[in-house]
Image: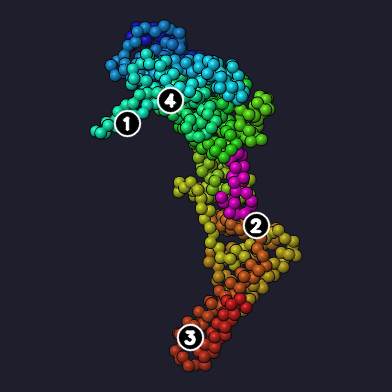
Amino acid sequence: MSDFAQTVKQQADIVKVIGGYIRLRKSGAQNYSGLCPFHKEKSPSFNVHASKQFFHCFGCGQSGDVFSFVAKIENLTFPEAVRTVAQKCGIPLPKREFNSPEEAAEAGQRRKLLDLHEIAAQWFEEQLRSPEGAIAREYLAGRGVTPEAIKLFRIGYSPDNFNGLRDRLASMADAETLRASGLFSSKDSEDAGGNVVRGHIYDRFRKRVMFPICNESGKVIAFTARTLDAGGDGKSGPKYLNSPETPLYTKGQVLFNLDKAKSAMRQMEFALLVEGQMDCISVYMRGIQNVIATSGTAFTEQQVGLLRRQTTNVVVNFDPDAAGANAAEKSIALLTEEGFTIKVVTLDGGLDPDRYIRERGVEGYAAAIRGARRQSDYLIERARQQFPGSSSDAKIKAMNYLLPHIRRIPQKLERDQFAHDAAQKLGIESAVLREELRQAALKRQDHIEMRSTGLLPWERFFIEAACNDSKSQQEYDALHADLRAFDRKLKEAGADWQELLQNFPAGLLVRLLERRLGEDIEHTAETEEQRILLHRVFLEAGELTRTHEQDMEIVRDLEIRALKGKIAKLRTAVELATDRNSLETIRLSQEILQLERKLRELECGE
Ligand SMILES: [Zn+2]
């Protein structure tokens, strides 16, 4: 270790430096602990020793000093980490030292790109203040962005000019570095040999409001730019244009405003997640400072990692439109998998956070955040909105929508609670849902096919009739009298309904028919399998809304079935008869003819 590194290490407070990245709590005289930023965990096994100046994680075994921590977490080389720590502690930097020329070149390019972005940000800020920037100032004023917000978020303007920024930065770096910065575009072409011929570079961002995107340390690493051409003729490009990926900036690895929001997040013990930069700025400027934006895309794993260092509680407030709801759902899904606790704000009036806070004030918005719903409640509500009604079809669809969300929850207790709530609110017997969940989890499927009981119409008819408790004693008795009448009719046709059962245990049906009104149906089941089967029958049935005609149809089906069975039996008897001309055989043949006539009548609809 160089003398300089030694000096920095002696002066730097490791607790303070690491505490700038993750939440640390005092856990002993010299000890601090927190959630490890290098592996997933729910309880803290990451420790920092104040006087010995090292960190150690009992979970993943990572350990080291302040430099190795910063190098690892910021993805820096060791010399870069030394310089970063020195800067954090206000120690003046000496000339740079590197281990290898490649390392020096890489660090050199990164530093150069950071410089270019810093100067570009300053230049955009100047342009916003210039006469040409009036159009952008007007737009920002119209959106309620105050001069303080413009200053704090370093909002700028890129003029309608192909060379402005290029001329400003040309003397600072060679053409390759300028290209690598992502601040410029160029018209490249291919020559006859297929080699790329680089065209001249020109400003990528033109006639746009410029929002700098900063890394965790607050350094500008990219821009997101909103067009000021309202025409939408396609000539001016997309509404929002972002920097391309560069050595500094990888899409999905940055959270907008994390640099400013992180201390408030740790203090308030939750992060407020909004969709757009404008929402984020608006909310932040009203004093709710734990707010970050995903910049319109769904959350990525890297972003979750960044967030985890600050808090594992998130309140999501995306736009109420369909795109917003979908983005919210995707982000919720990922955060859930990662063990976050999530609440969801739905602003009434279909407003986005920016509009809402301007119309209802910060108190109104704060109240909306306090009233945020648990993610399970939010998702159940979404399910009910998408699949309204109490039909079994709607219930199964709603359940299928919820299942992946439920299965994603890592903690068993919470998963069970969610499943229980969903079942209750959707009106599903939760034993069925639990069984289906178990099955789906076993097979690692993302949805269930609510396996059909495959009941035949008459099976369903008997079971539902036998289980129908929504009637008076009289009606119940009448119904069971009807069932006995069917029984007689079937016996006359030479069949027994018990023989007709294919998918339902006859014993269970007998017990159901013997059940008295109001007696617990579940008690008729003798095994867990039978109990689940009963639940499934009811779930499939939904509401009993069959008409008398449909019931008659079922009775006819039954009779036909019984007749066919009897005819088949008689035919076998005739074929087995030793004497085809005996009186008995002739009598059987005549009976078959009679039954067949009856069958034809029934099949023709009488
Ligand atoms: Zn660890």
Disc on the earlier residue, 3 or 1:
1
Residue 344 shown left or right of residue 80 in the figure: right
What range is drawn magenta here?
A: 377-397
Contact, CB < 8 Å: mark 3 with mark 1? no
- In the image, which disc is placed on residue 543? 2
Please state the horizontal and vertical placement of residue 1, each as a whole percent of the image.
33, 11
Q: Residue at x 56, y 65 (%)?
A: 456
Mark 1 to mark 2: distance in Å?
68 Å
Disc on the earlier residue, 1 or 2:
1
Mark 2 to mark 4: distance in Å?
62 Å
Q: Is mark 3 within 8 Å of ligand 1?
A: no
Q: Residues within 10 Å of mark 1 (few under 14, many from 20)?
A: few
Q: Is residue 546 visible?
A: yes
Q: Nearer the viewer, mark 3 or mark 1?
A: 1
Q: Residue at x 43, y 25 (%)?
A: 204
Residue that mark 1 sits on: 189
Please state the horizontal and vertical placement of residue 346, each as a whole percent of the image.
62, 35
